[in-house]
């Protein structure tokens, strides 16, 4: 949506709320795909967590305003789609607000000019999504049968992170003759970022985690990465989508791959890292890492692969959790010499040491993810990725919870033998 249209909506939200009905408009926005199911689900979650100092807003009133705010972050056709919806719903006063520089006589007669697709999608009623609903991953269009292959959809929606980290552009392609560098100079196939963020659980909600997704998208989009995203869902859905992506044309053509896997984590009884999905199933982190072996993932052979795991790896902590800080933990009762290696070119990034907790701010998100995004934005133009990680670790260890809780990040290098420069906003094509 362009700036002018976004400004019209934001400056007139109270009037738009006054002249529309929340549930009717929400159903229409879902039916026309102006809002995704996940965005509708988040509206309810936001309303449950809202703090209304004056006590003057009901949950629906709060969501009504948030609905219009979310529309301003949709694609370039969102403003026109909203106008067509208002025409179809006969919301003349609201439509006048969006068309304030026009004559408004006979708007009701204009209903005949509404595209038939808008009429059709508004015909059937639709139920509101509850906050506990597990949605289909954003990157999946459809799943036809249990064993079908999910269809991949690149995530193109606008995001609005709390802190917008602007990436410093490179003025040249960085190289290192002594060590060598991974090729990162394509204009259209620079990299693939896959975000798997598990926020909603049966008895828990990871406050601030949604902002981590937005921050990553905001930064990696500036780096030229194609982005795929799944929010919540089951273990089966995750591995099906991951396998589809790793065997797709996207990864065959890409120069690099980054996975950001965000959820609750812990050590199991065998002292192995495990993570939990929204369906409360648990998997060993090793099973995720194994998907990136050269045998199982030939599309990414000899290409840099970065796996980011910002979750807890145990229950140990120097001091207790403060009221403003949560932890991501779950309770428990062309190099020929490497072409045949089982694992290579893999960098695994952890937010904390094995056995320890990782901190997450309830509003801004993971300490580690936020510092990673900020450091990439500031230094990727002339600093290779392993040095960026060192800077992140030095910054994160200086952060303190109110009672002194800390964490120390670390990473594991598996045959990641060349320097990995992201070369933002520059290519040799």
Image (cartoon, rainbow, N blue to C red):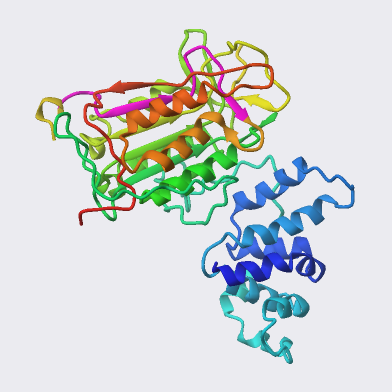
Residue displayed at 20% across by 57% down: 429
Residue 274 horizontal side relative to residue 184, left or right: right
Q: Nearer the viewer, residue 5 or 425?
A: 425
Q: Is residue 428 above or below residue 14?
A: above
Position of residue 377 measured from the top left corner of the image (x, y, whole percent) = 43, 43
Position of residue 243 measured from the top left corner of the image (x, y, whole percent) = 36, 38
Number of labels in the image equals 0
Can residue 126 be seen in the rendering of this structure?
A: no
Q: Is residue 321 above or below residue 122?
A: above
Figure quadrant of the N terminus: bottom right
Q: Is residue 353 above or below residue 218?
A: above
Region in magenta? 340-360
Q: Furthest-top residue in view? A: 270
Position of residue 358 measured from the top left corner of the image (x, y, whole percent) = 55, 22
Q: Nearer the viewer, residue 201 or 188?
A: 188
Residue 351 horizontal side relative to residue 78, left or right: left
Q: Main secondary structure of the magenta part?
A: loop
Q: Nearer the viewer, residue 168 or 408?
A: 168
Residue displayed at 34% across by 48% down: 424
Q: Furthest-left residue in view? A: 336
Residue displayed at 71% across by 67% down: 11
Position of residue 254 measured from the top left corner of the image (x, y, whole percent) = 27, 46
Magenta residue check for 234: no
Residue displayed at 23% across by 29% down: 295
Can residue 236 be seen in the rendering of this structure?
A: yes
Magenta residue check for 351: yes
């Amino acid at each position: 949506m362009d700036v002018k249209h976004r400004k019209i909506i934001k400056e007139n939200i109270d009037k738009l709320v006054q002249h529309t009905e929340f549930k009717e408009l929400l159903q229409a926005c879902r039916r026309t795909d102006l809002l995704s199911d996940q965005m509708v689900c988040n509206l309810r979650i936001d309303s449950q967590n809202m703090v209304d100092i004056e006590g003057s807003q009901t949950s629906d009133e709060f969501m009504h305003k948030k609905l219009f705010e979310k529309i301003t972050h949709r694609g370039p056709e969102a403003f026109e789609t909203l106008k067509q919806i208002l025409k179809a719903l006969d919301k003349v006063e609201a439509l006048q607000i969006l068309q304030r520089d026009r004559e408004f006589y006979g708007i009701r007669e204009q209903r005949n000019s509404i595209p038939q697709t808008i009429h059709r999608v508004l015909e059937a009623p639709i139920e509101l999504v509850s906050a506990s609903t597990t949605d289909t991953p954003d990157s999946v269009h459809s799943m036809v049968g249990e064993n079908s292959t999910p269809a991949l959809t690149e995530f193109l929606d606008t995001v609005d992170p709390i802190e917008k980290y602007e990436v410093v552009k490179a003025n040249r392609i960085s190289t290192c003759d002594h060590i060598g560098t991974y090729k990162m100079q394509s204009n259209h196939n620079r990299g693939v970022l896959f975000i798997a963020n598990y926020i909603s659980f049966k008895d828990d909600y990871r406050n601030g985690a949604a902002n981590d997704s937005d921050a990553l998208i905001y930064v990696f989009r500036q780096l030229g990465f194609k982005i795929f995203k799944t929010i919540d869902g089951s273990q089966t859905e995750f591995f099906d989508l991951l396998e589809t992506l790793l065997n797709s044309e996207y990864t065959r053509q890409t120069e690099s791959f980054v996975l950001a896997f965000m959820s609750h984590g812990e050590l199991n009884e065998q002292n192995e890292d495990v993570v939990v999905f929204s369906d409360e199933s648990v998997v060993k982190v090793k099973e995720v890492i194994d998907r990136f072996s050269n045998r199982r993932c030939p599309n990414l052979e000899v290409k840099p692969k970065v796996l980011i795991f910002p979750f807890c790896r145990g229950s140990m902590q120097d001091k207790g959790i403060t009221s403003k800080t949560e932890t991501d933990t779950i309770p428990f009762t062309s190099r020929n010499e490497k072409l045949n290696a089982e694992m290579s070119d893999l960098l695994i990034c952890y937010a904390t040491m094995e056995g320890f907790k990782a901190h997450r701010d309830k509003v801004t998100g993971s300490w580690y993810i936020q510092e990673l995004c900020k450091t990439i934005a500031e230094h990727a133009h002339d600093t290779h990725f392993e040095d960026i990680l060192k800077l992140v670790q030095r910054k994160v260890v200086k952060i303190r919870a109110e009672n002194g809780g800390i964490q120390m990040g670390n990473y594991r290098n598996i045959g990641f033998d060349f320097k990995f420069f992201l070369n933002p906003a520059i290519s040799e094509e």
